[in-house]
Image (spheres, grey):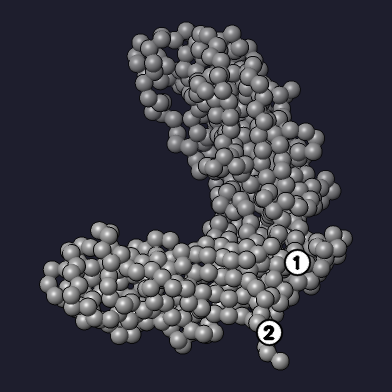
Amino acid sequence: MKTRKAIYLGLATLLALSSLSAPMTVLAAGTDTSSSSSQSSSTSSSSSTSSVPSSSSSSASVDSSSASQDTKITKVALQDSTDPVGTPSDATAASKSGWSFILTVLRKGFNSKLPDQYIAIQNIAKAKISGVKILTPLNFPAQKYDVDIYRWHWDETNKKWVRDAAKSVKAEGFLFSEILGFLTTNNYKLSDLTVGTYYYQYHYSYNVLFTKHEFFSNLSKVVVTPEPIPATSADTDTDNSDGTPKVIYSDVDYEANAILTPNNSTDDTEWLVGSSNDKLTFSPSDTRSTKIMAGDGHTNQLTSKYIPDSYYTGKVNTDPKAPGILANYKIAVGTLAQKAKKLYVGGLPAYNAESDAGGTWLVGGLSDLQTASQANTKWHYTWKFTDSSGKAIATPGTADGVTNVEGDVDNITNLNSAAPLTFTKDSSFMKNAAIATAASKSYRAQVTFTTNLVDDDGTTQPISVVSNKAELQSTPVLPRLSLDEVPSFDFGDITATDIYNGTNDKLAAKESQLAVTDTSGGKTWSLSAKMSRFTSDQGNQLENNVKISDTGADIGVGLVLVDNGVMNAVSNSYGGGSYSSKVNGKLQMSSNHKLQIMDNEKYSSTITWDLSGGTPPIDPA
């Protein structure tokens, strides 16, 4: 077997004198054998200062449609077709959004936005503002909240927005979520509207120790059209920029939006799970924008404590290409065919590698987790390992060839770059894992992230996020012979004087690496190389004898490259095995006073490396 690599060496000259040196909750708008690898290495010399390149869902949500208020409001007269101007000037700026994480209220306020909506007048009877989630203090004993509703209509005569009389809607929740401060407003009917444009805003308040706390939602634009506007296509924003499904984690709310064409379509939107095997909750499920939560997490009815998901965190991923457990969902929009979509839950792919390869186990979905958590504190990560039966395995450490099993990162997004779980080459832990994999009993891993979030009262709340489980598929070492790295020589600037008078042992600017991987099992190999004449981009050859050498390199016979196109032995390994050495070549160039070089003429040479496997020589008797 032979492995050959071509390396191009560049020599650039720029002559003027004999010596030169030139330098998820927005409510939606809607009414509801041996192998080798090739690398290039270069030697470059230049008379300029630049070297010449060488070539080579939430459990607290309430569906209160049955309890929707049929609020009676005096109908507004049919509005003029002239487009209204701006937005209501007397609307209060929206309060900072409410924020919760794993059923813990961290900031009070509206936890979902009022949706912009486009409604055909013929469907006005069923039009509504779906329930809006609000976050309150611990609510014991459980009580309902009155949420004020402000509406503005356009006064065409006076060219201004006019606010109508305030109405109210109840906000309530299931008993235990209600106690924890999670409430949802009842649906609010819009059946009194006529064709035109309106704005809505919600408001609620509560008193603590004689101090009133008030919260205002965003402004919601509601447009009633004289005719339906059907959607021609529908999608969602739960894909990455490369089209792959996003990764989410159990028990965490993620914002998601339906994307309709045209944007002002009056069609209804509904979020649906793919099947009963897909544990996804959409809150709300009948608007263009929603929040998605994965898992079977729920509140214990006796203790009012949240029980985290065990469905996705208990599943084992066996696919190295899947960053978690697949979850399917779909959206239904008008008369369009339902759009099937995918997500991955848990973030952890299976890890598959040869036991001596070394590598890192990366985790998916970290950037979106950081966004969803809004955390500005450090994260702690902990990896745990079990055998195939679920029995815990002693946590490996540096002595076992495993690093970054536990530690801290300032931002969870940076885990894969700052502190990835890493296996060294020839890791004893990976060798033991290979034995288990060979017996169809692969080890399993799971990672837990914890951080401390601070609520708007200054109280610290510890939060944990758990990945899915995933197999560690450590495989036996496969026989191979490969040339992994070859030297890259850079001798910096070469002046005209150097070329005419020659150079002697000019050192390369920095060390390079020569590396061979041999797992062929005792077979021998040899490495040779040859270097061609330097030839310019105008077809002229450099007649100087040029040699690159590093006799001090630990490569058997020593590295000697002469630009005569003759293959020279570089290294022999009669015992086989992998090899690596640092190389720092020296440039030797004979003098040539007859040489004529044109301005800006650039010279290059090709080095060809040849790695061969074979039978070791037999010593004479």
Q: Secondary structure at mark 1?
A: loop
The x and y percentages for residue 202 are 55, 31
Q: Residue 275 got which mark? A: none
Which is nearer the N-term, disc 2 or disc 1? 1
Residue 344 location, x and y as percent?
A: 68, 45
Q: Compare residues 469 and 200 and report the one nearer the observer.
A: 469
In the orientation shown, which residue stands out farthest toward the left? 17
- Disc 2 marks which amino acid? Ile
Residue 187 showing in the rendered view:
no
Give the number of the mark in front: 2 or 1. Answer: 2
Location of mark 2 (residue):
618
Quadrant in the rendering for residue 504: bottom left
Which amino acid, by three-letter code, is at mark 1? Pro
Q: Secondary structure at mark 2?
A: loop
Question: x%, y% of residue 289?
Answer: 59, 32
In the image, is residue 528 above or below residue 221?
below
Q: Is residue 279 above or below residue 460?
A: above
Picture disc at residue 476? 1
Q: Callout 2: 10 Å neighbours few (<14), some, many (20+)?
A: few
Q: What residue appears at the point 38 percent right and 28 percent down from the top-left corner?
A: 89
Q: Residue at x 37, y 82 (%)?
A: 586
